[in-house]
Image: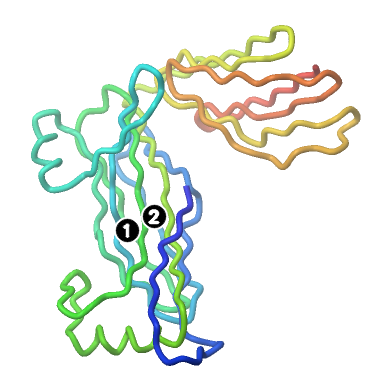
Amino acid sequence: MKFLLSLLTIGAMSMTAHAASPSIHVGSLYEYIDGDKSNILKRVRNIGDATAFVRVNVTEMVYDAEGKSTEVPVTTEHLAQRSADGYSLVASPARLIVPAKGQHATRLLYQGSRDQERYYRVRFVPVVPEKGDQDFALNDAEAVKYQGELSAGIQVLTGYGIVVIVRPKDVRYDTTVQEEPGAFTLHNRGNTTVSVDNFTDCEAAGKNCTAPRKMHVRPGSSQRVDKVSGHHYSFDIVEGAKPRKMQIDA
C-alpha cells in the first residue's frame, strides 16, 4: 500500500544536514463507508518541518472472476461515463496544503447506487509545486521560494495509498470457517467484505508468535490458511461492530 515518490533536487555540492522536509501520515490504510453512510473524513498529518503539498488521486478497483483487480482512474471523463450507472467516489478537496506540524482533511464522498460493494484506492501524493503550477494557487515567486527551502540535498517525499471499501445499503454477513487436514478456509457468503484481524500463528503454549496481521475476504471469496502441526492460530472475524474470536489448533 505504501509507495515512495522520489523527487531529486540538486543544489550546491555540499548538503545541509537539517534541510526542511515534509513528512505526511494518513492513519489507517483501510477505510469503510458503511451502508447507512455516504462519506468519511480522512485526516492527513504532517509531522515534518516544511509545508506539505498533497495531491489526492482516486481510482476504482474492479475485480474479475479470478479475483484480480484493475484500477480505473476516477477522472472528469470517468465521472461523466459513470453518470448513467450512478456511482463514484470523489475526494473534496483533491489538493491539500498541510502546514508543518499540522493537519488537513479531505472528505471522501460516495454518490450513487448501493446495490453491491465497491472498492477504491485513494493515493495521497506529496509534490513540489513548480512555476506555473495552478493546483495549489501559488504564484511563481512562492513556488520558487518553496523549491529553495527543499534544495539543500536529496528530498524523498513519501506518499500513501489507502483502500476505501464502500459497503452495500443492505449489509448481510455470512462467514464460516471450514477445517480440513492441513488447512482451514474462511468462506464469505455474505455481500460485504469481512475483516480478519489480529491473526497470529503461534507455536505450542503461545511461544514464538508471528506479528498480528490483517486480512480481508471479499464477498463470494474464500481465504485458505495452511496449518503447521502443533501450531495455534488465533484471529478475530469482524462482521460490522461484532468481532468474533476464533482459535484453531493444528
Q: Residues within 10 Å of mark 1 (few under 14, many from 20)?
A: some
Q: Position of residue 95 (x, y in %)?
A: 26, 64
Q: Residue at x 91, y 30 (%)?
A: 205
Relative horizontal placement of residue 147, taking residue 188 as reference (left or right): left
* Badge count: 2
Q: Choose top left, top right, bottom left or bottom right for residue 10.
A: bottom left
Q: Quadrant of the C terminus?
A: top right
Residue 42's disc is: 2
Please say if 34 is above or below 115.
below
Quadrant of the rendered image containing residue 207: top right
Front in this rendered view, residue 88 or 142: 142
Colouring scheme, one of rainbow, by chain, secondary structure, one colour:
rainbow
Which secondary structure lies at badge 2?
strand
Mark 2 vs mark 1: which is more N-terminal?
A: 2
Q: Amino acid at mark 1?
A: Thr
**Is residue 204 shown left or right of residue 172?**
right
Instruction: Indicate the position of residue 59 as horizontal and vertical percent values.
Output: 28, 43
- 38 or 25, nearer to the observer: 25
Q: Which residue sits furthest right? A: 205
Q: Quadrant of residue 149?
A: bottom left
Secondary structure, mark 1, is: strand
In-image side of 214 versus 85 (left or right): right
Work out whether 32 lies above or below 232: below
245 to 46, vertically: above or below: above
Q: Residue at x 14, y 41 (%)?
A: 78
Q: Could you tell whether 245 is left or right of 136 in the image? A: right
Contact, CB < 8 Å: mark 2 with mark 1?
yes
The kind of residue on which mark 2 rests is Lys
How far is disc 2 from disc 1 in space, using C-alphas? 5 Å
Which mark is on residue 106?
1
Q: Residue at x 25, y 83 (%)?
A: 143
